[in-house]
Amino acid sequence: MNHFDEIDDLTLGALRALALDEIDTANSGHPGMALDIAPALYVLYRDFLVSDPSRPLHPGRDRFVLSAGHVSALLYAMLHLAAYDLPLEELKRFRQLGSKCPGHPEWGLTPGVDATSGPLGQGLAQAVGMAVAEKALKARFPGSEGYLSHRVYALCGDGCLEEGLSQEAISFAGLQKLDNLTFIYDANGSTLDNPTSVSLVEDVALRFKAAGWDVYEVNDGNDLRAIHDAIEEAVSLKENKAPSLVIVHTSIGYGSELQGSHKVHGSPLGFEMSAKAKEKLGYPYPPFTVKKEAYQRLAETFAERGHLALLEKDRSLKGYEKEHPEEAAILSSLLAGKSFVPPRDKFELKEKEATRNTSGRYLNLLSGVHPGLIGGAADVAGSLKTDLKGSGRFSPEDRSGKNLAYGIREFLTGSIENGILLSGGLFPYGGTFLVFSDYMKAAIRMSALEHLPTLYLFSHDSIAVGEDGPTHEPIEQLSGLRLIPGLLDFRPADGRELVAGYELALERKGGPTVLVLSRQDLPLLEHSSVDKAKLGAYRLEEGNDLELIASGSEVSLALEVRSLLKEKGIEAAVVSVPSFNLLGAMKEPPFRLERSRRIAIEMASGALWYRYAEHVVSIESFGASGKEKEVIAHFGFDAEAVAEKVLDAFLPSKGGH
Amino acid sequence: MNHFDEIDDLTLGALRALALDEIDTANSGHPGMALDIAPALYVLYRDFLVSDPSRPLHPGRDRFVLSAGHVSALLYAMLHLAAYDLPLEELKRFRQLGSKCPGHPEWGLTPGVDATSGPLGQGLAQAVGMAVAEKALKARFPGSEGYLSHRVYALCGDGCLEEGLSQEAISFAGLQKLDNLTFIYDANGSTLDNPTSVSLVEDVALRFKAAGWDVYEVNDGNDLRAIHDAIEEAVSLKENKAPSLVIVHTSIGYGSELQGSHKVHGSPLGFEMSAKAKEKLGYPYPPFTVKKEAYQRLAETFAERGHLALLEKDRSLKGYEKEHPEEAAILSSLLAGKSFVPPRDKFELKEKEATRNTSGRYLNLLSGVHPGLIGGAADVAGSLKTDLKGSGRFSPEDRSGKNLAYGIREFLTGSIENGILLSGGLFPYGGTFLVFSDYMKAAIRMSALEHLPTLYLFSHDSIAVGEDGPTHEPIEQLSGLRLIPGLLDFRPADGRELVAGYELALERKGGPTVLVLSRQDLPLLEHSSVDKAKLGAYRLEEGNDLELIASGSEVSLALEVRSLLKEKGIEAAVVSVPSFNLLGAMKEPPFRLERSRRIAIEMASGALWYRYAEHVVSIESFGASGKEKEVIAHFGFDAEAVAEKVLDAFLPSKGGH
């Protein structure tokens, strides 16, 4: 079917009407862009998107990301009309507690929603990750292309393109020649506050072309034929050539009395104004009326095409299974999210090693065990030790490369990881220096929102960074990450604890893991334990006078402090706390003395430790540039200085010793 | 002087040599880009930059930002040769504790350093803020142009351009036609990890042109004449036309044995290899040798030109003072950083009002009092209530407009504010929804690093956001901000506390202030107090059984809970804690009962409250989409539910009541 008729007009009317009905019923939502971009979304579903609404998680389906997540009402209307399991009752509860139609699309909640979106730019960036995943996964399983090949679409407005993250996404996708990726840009000339003439006057087409994209334009966003032709050109096979952008020029709030005004962006029209708009749009029916012809049209186009295409993919998989039974089994286990964990006895522990180096060695071991591993760093691979030796670099020339050079794009690094996990099958990792986790905070939060097991590696985890100085020395970052709901923070004190962190990350299903790594050497601790570390906190040494508690590099420091205190006749226990998340969930935390006899030691902001300790030795200012040991001494974190602070804190009661 | 001779070669040799000497002596630093971009920096200082090294803070000087902050050694070498107060002894202590030559440039520490840089992209973005400031300040004081007019230069490498923030900066500067702004881009084809072919293959010139910039290219980064000509073209007066980019093609590590390899990016050459490089570069002298001709050349060019130009500016100021004595006095007080605080009796308090609305009214009062006010929001001005009524919008057509539309560019919003403050004279504000403070976290940290009194406004400060759902509901953000060293967090409970927050922000000199505002109405509290709120925490109600402590909208909730408890015979005190930063510094915190009898209430992550309370009623998961009151009830934050939790926590000891 590639002509458009009055049934299409009716179906498009139903689509727009439903979106207005949702928004008016909730008295909340964004009608402006929903009205203007509806035709493009309709054509995309009618003629291009390959998916079966009854199998919304099929690995070979096309992905669609509504990067302009505030237009969720339109997406829900589309999914309903397209026969996804999203009944009218859910649309009537748009933006109500417990509805499958929340304010912004949420991955895992609504069938047909392929990513959580709303925080602008992140939909586009995650779509780039999905496109990477599509290329990388099928390259690892030659012969599986018929099953796995698909396209990734994302729809954005001006907001996404104003966010800097979009440029990271555009630049990376162009560099990687992700020809399986198409962005549709609703150029409606308006943002929430203003016409875009106030905030975005750039030549968007030129900006994408500068990054190596193919660009197509539709001058009239209501011309279904023109939209069809532009998308068709954009998706025509151009192997390893370029991602594509389709610019659709529209008029915000099309069909409503507020058409053309930014005031229609974020405020409901109200039933009265909507009724007029619906009449003008040729769909003059009461709220939530859907003519059966509308369902019918999408059943005959979108659903039937998708159904057949996925059956064909399944057949292709059958053939693949027959020809490559072992590989097919591995692929199947990857797609099922199976955990691949290296056997512990294969990993050698060193007496003294920076945990970033231990991490690098572990990754290389993992690379031989995990068929889905892919990752790298935001241009600090050499420092973060993320290179997988003997593996190539993912590139247009080598899609099977396991090393992913994200570039100096921290935010995108997190988004690509998220997109890869949303796509399914691969296990990504990525990271940078801990201080620059700030640049990717919103992506890390997104991992947690989406319940994805995203693995973040952050090294250079304290003022021990030294020479690079305060701009490169984390203070508040570790604690800040510990605050994110559902995030597993893990700061290993030595090699054994590092293994614990990796095992937790590899076994985890419902949320991200952050491994926080030292730049400097750390000794292998006599009593550290992989299994105990996996509990989140455990006792390393006993002592009845007080308890020293710490994480990461400060655990060995605490052990030194313990020795110094012993000379003074004070018996201090030492508790290692690699993870606040896990400690918070422990039924029996490993503390034996009362809170007033606990003292926490951290070379960073100490505010979170007060939950567990009355006394905290921490840093509440920014770092300094200097040699590692001098900076550490400057902030009072050599063992002698810490021991003195401990004595100061307890002297009143410990004077007798 | 506009030809180049052997003395220039010698001076350039000294510049490169000094940078290598610093790096080798510290055995830490980034020689690659220092070597290749030295000629461009030299030509900029020799022939263009207008500044007097003996008056490094003159308001009318040109600004220079080394956005590629890791090349600090080169900048220090340049500043030394150019006669800034930076003796060789400081260069010899490059990257050592207490040196004026830290790992990355730090504002306020080193004369001639106009911004802290190192976190990539932020130098460029702050330079955009400086360019805004130059336009905006002189437009407010017609006749002052001769004194205030200047240019802003920033030097970047590939790293800055890969960061998304750079696109926000480029797009905004193009839109605003900041023709006083010039970026110099060192196209050396390398980043830390790799040749740029791996991570950046875009057409940078086209990308800038798409945003409306003028672009000039220098094909040979060692051709001083070509560099001179390109910069000259770029800075030739084009009033209200376009910002300019000068692309300088170079070879990383020029002159060294590692020239052309990314391996020379971030590792010292070592004295031996440096000696060879210095010889090849025509400067075969022992470390830290400076030939007097080098000083002489820069004294005759840079210093003399700057000295005369600033004297001329001073004369122009004298004229301005004579013709406009009142305006000149105001300008002088602005440049001196005087605080302008509205009289309290001019501000009307309402019985019930969302603090975002109170903030909007206060801003409009402030607008009539503060001659330097400029600001807005990242496209949520309508929601954040940041519009100054009766004031225009800052634009190419109206540089006196006080309303600044940052666009959907949160990170840039913070950077522009920082840049405006670095420039001096104006008082900026900016913000977005609290949850999207994540996007600008790194800029907020930069405000604190630079000790700037940057004012951030964040509204929609809890799950009371309602319909927009979890992507738009802050949980960990408020606590995350409280962790930043030197940042004044302030979450007012009502209108009086809001006034307190603004007064603190306006009076503050050494660090940023974050005002955290409610979307929903809050009642004016009977016993709230501006003066007491400015202490950081104070008692609102007395009670001897337990203490309820809270901030913002949870303070009135605590008061409701108190009433419910009273019915049960329990006397609870209520303590309002608008600021953790201030509370942490209070000599006598306002608590009267022991910690075990305190209970904190916050509709967000509660982890930080354990420092002050044994019991915490908080939210440790993400929010939900629904009607405000239903979402609040869902998370157990109606007064009845909280009262029950309080009873649960204390029932063992309070069972007798």
Image: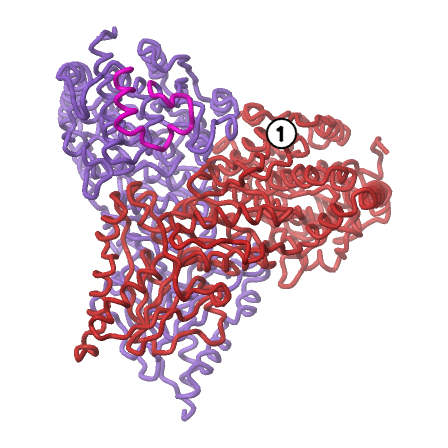
Chain colours: A purple, B red
Q: Which residues are magenta?
A: A255-280
Which residue is located at x 44 percent, y 36 percent?
Answer: A165
Give how far across and how far down residue B122 sits, in percent: 56, 43
Q: Is residue B346 above or below residue B574?
A: above
User: In the figure, is residue A618 to the left or right of B544?
Assistant: right
Q: Is residue B568 above or below residue B500?
A: below
Quadrant in the picture for the N terminus of chain A: top left
Q: Is residue A158 above or below residue B442?
A: above
User: In the figure, is residue B259 to the left or right of A292?
Assistant: right
Which residue is located at x 16 percent, y 21 percent?
Answer: A290
Residue corresponding to mark 1: B396
- As for residue A569 lying within the magenta part, the answer is no
Going by the numbered disc 1, the residue's amino acid type is Pro
Q: Nearer the viewer, residue A104 or B144?
A: B144
Dot 1: element: loop
Q: Does residue B399 appear anywhere in the picture?
A: yes
**Pointer 1 local density, CA inside 10 Å: few below 14, some 14–19, many at least 20:** some
Q: Nearer the viewer, residue B535 or B65?
A: B535
Give how far across and how far down residue B386 sits, in percent: 49, 43
In which chain is the residue bearing label 1?
Answer: B
User: In the figure, is residue A96 to the left or right of A495?
Assistant: left
Give how far across and how far down residue A308 sits, in percent: 15, 18
Q: Nearer the viewer, residue B605 or A480?
A: B605
Q: Which quadrant of the structure image shows residue B453?
A: bottom right
Give how far across and how far down residue A554 sits, in percent: 42, 67
Quadrant in the picture for the C terminus of chain A: bottom left
